[in-house]
Amino acid sequence: MEESFIVNDFFLGFAAHAHTKNKLETDPNKETDLRNKNNQEEAQKLTERTLDKIETDISTAGYALKDVKLLILYSSYRGDSDDKDRQICETILQTIEKRFRNQSDQLRLIGHTTAGEIENEDLVLTEVTGIGYNGLSLLAVVTNLPIGVGRTFGFQTKKEAIAQGRELTHDAWVDFNENIINRKHAQLSKTLFVLTQGPTAGDLQTLGKRGHEHFLAEGIASFIRNTREAKITKVLGGSSGDGLIAHTCRQFHGKLNNRSNFKVLNREAVCVLIPNLSDPSVGSDVTPTRHIGKPFTFNFDQKTQPKFMDIKRIDNRDPAELFAEVIFENEERRYGKQGNPWSDKKQVLASISNFEGIPVHPAIGKYAFTFPFGNYTPVCPIRVTTKHDEKKDERIIDLAHPVKSYEAMMKGYIAEIDCEKVQNGARELYRTLREDRGFGERDFTLIVSCISRRLAEIMAGTKSKTEPEILKEALSSTQLLGFLAYGELWVSHLLQEPFHHNFSCWGITFRSAIGKEPHDYVEPMVAKVPEVLQGRISTGYGPLDDLLLGGIPENSTVILSSPSCEERDNVIKKFLKTGAKEDEVTFYITTKTSGLNELVMEFPSSFFLFICNPQADKIVEDMPNVFKLKGLENLTEINIALTSAIRKLNKSLKGSRRICIEIVSDILLQHHAAKTRKWLNALIPELKSSGFTTLAVIDSEIHPQQEVRAVAGVFEGEININKKESDKGSQKFLRIAKMTNQKYLDHELLLKRD
């Protein structure tokens, strides 16, 4: 009998938001007036209201302030002058410290100032639009698990940024380990959440000038690569903003134990290391843009460091002039003369030429450059500078982070944020985060969304179903904490690039857990299946068939998402052997035989092997039921081979048919997500019309999460195998993630290698 275990640790989120405005201020003069009116007394009251709600909610849940291990703070409540702004920030921290003093000896705090917070409720506003401004958001994490925080100590160059990224992560890991009580917690996988300085207007020396957010993330990735024992599997975060004025961006950091050291930092980065008691859900939208017109040839200045960050010519023209021309013509074409915010191209050029960290005009913020060859997201211009030369002065467009390239000249596009794509991306983000598991009341979701997405919606006059509204409604049943960023960070344990994004929206949902007896394990028996439904195809693996109420629905399509492991291979083998032994037509498409050569010999009339490998002749002998293909380069060749084999099937073979497609990951690596989806969307209807039940397999650890989700969305069902750490060591668990319009049991199975 299969068993599963439940870790009786507790991990819950409690969020509160208090803002005075529900929309961003895009007029710099009005924003300055607003900051002039802000004061320490109001900041204290807003903070106390959030703390009151959090304390009440924690008490209602049966816990106390002493159980809070982590606070994440976002604030868009700012003062105008530097001194007044610092005083307001310090007041907020002092108010928090006063509430928690003598309550907790392991409290950690990180946070930063933002361009606005994403929220699903508010204690002050009567109308919640999904955006809170001129206020603050606070998340309290109640847990018995260790938490670790880290911070940087100044970085002005690429070398310093990389070094500080390593040190930042190392400090959080050390702090995490110093707080461990139960050693099994050290074996949990972890998520690193990073908040860093963003670009500041008017200051050529601040972060954003030379892509330091990108290089900071490069340092983080270096630590993960060289310190596997830290078990950091995901990194999410972003650079902070300060509204459209962007005078000062600050970070918050501190530990509350014997003495408080909550601090307001300037131009730094802070992070927190969060253990994954259960696998968090991750979602993203990274391409909300559309190309404008034809491709251009971009010429990078190779004399400056870092390389591929300075555009000196576009189609052999002044880059600022061409950029201004494209923007002006596009605005007029889309919105007409009355809707164009500029009267002529010279006005656009003037706005671009004064571009220093933050666009002078918000409409410029929705434009960027896109490039091929591994540049997965648009790259924003961050500043226009003038390079003085003996012959003539040249305008240079500085980019927010390096472009991935090997030559000084490359093709690319000027792109604009498409509001419809932003909204569709928000819906897809929600669907990915939900993962057919729903949301618990004390789950919490961290959202990082580029401010340019919101500005594009504002400039387009979008009044309803905006991205913040979609996220507010979709995540209304759980705890939400988000902010508008000036750049988004993402690193996986597989070190997928890029580290720094623009125009993207990222989210991660941490699943809550409530333990009855902390540090114990309960090993319940898997519930007995109440019924076995008709029209099911046995997988050959009894406990899995139990979850599926008899097996995979006949003629359906299911994908098995799992890291490469013996447990996954066992599921595949059982699925194939069961079909062959029952004289069902059984197709197996693979790049290797995985020890299944005996099926080829034993069941020549029912088991058919399609091996896609240039070395196929050395792997398996020639037989009538073996089809050898040269590789995966030609997807059409694979389809032709399958179609031909189906047509030649012995008509006396009646009954069910099944197919296992084990080449999805190989095709995804070689052909990428769009072409893989296209291939599957063409193949699956053919298989269904021929009576096949499909089990496809994808390696969940070797692809970016968004690519895995893109492929999994093609299938009607999804089965996940995940690895978890316990006091018994590393174990694999299986769960049905979805089975569209079909019944199944939502239980978790502990898998055994045998």
Image (tube, rainbow, N blue to C red):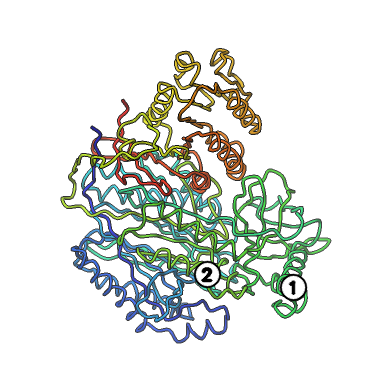
Q: Residue furthest left?
A: 517
The span from disc 1 to disc 2 (Cα, nearest Å) is 23 Å
Residue 702 in the image: state x and y as whole percent.
Answer: 49, 38
Residue 116 in the image: state x and y as whole percent.
Answer: 47, 71
- Label 1 close to label 2 by CB (< 8 Å): no
Q: Nearer the viewer, residue 664 or 606?
A: 606
Q: Residue furthest front?
A: 652
Residue 200 in the image: state x and y as whole percent.
Answer: 55, 68
Residue at 30 percent of width and 37 percent of height? 546
Residue 411: image tag: none
Q: Which residue is mark 2?
A: 466
Quarter of the image where the N terminus is located:
top left
In this rendering, the answer to whether 754 lies above or below 118 is above
What amino acid type should be assigned to the residue bearing mark 1?
A: Glu
Residue 632 horizontal side relative to residue 520, left or right: right
Q: What SS does tag 2 mark? A: loop
Residue at 31 percent of width and 74 percent of height? 50
Residue 46 horizontal side relative to residue 198, left or right: left
Q: Nearer the viewer, residue 612 or 135?
A: 612
What amino acid type should be assigned to the residue bearing mark 2?
A: Thr
Q: Residue furthest right?
A: 391
Q: Which residue is mark 1?
A: 332
Q: Nearer the viewer, residue 385 or 360?
A: 360
Q: What SS does tag 1 mark? A: helix
Residue at 32 percent of width and 48 percent of height? 278
Quarter of the image where the C terminus is located:
top left
Residue 543 horizontal side relative to residue 241, left or right: left
Residue 275 in the image: state x and y as whole percent.
Answer: 32, 49
Q: Residues within 10 Å of mark 2 (few under 14, many from 20)?
A: many
Q: Residues within 10 Å of mark 1 (few under 14, many from 20)?
A: some
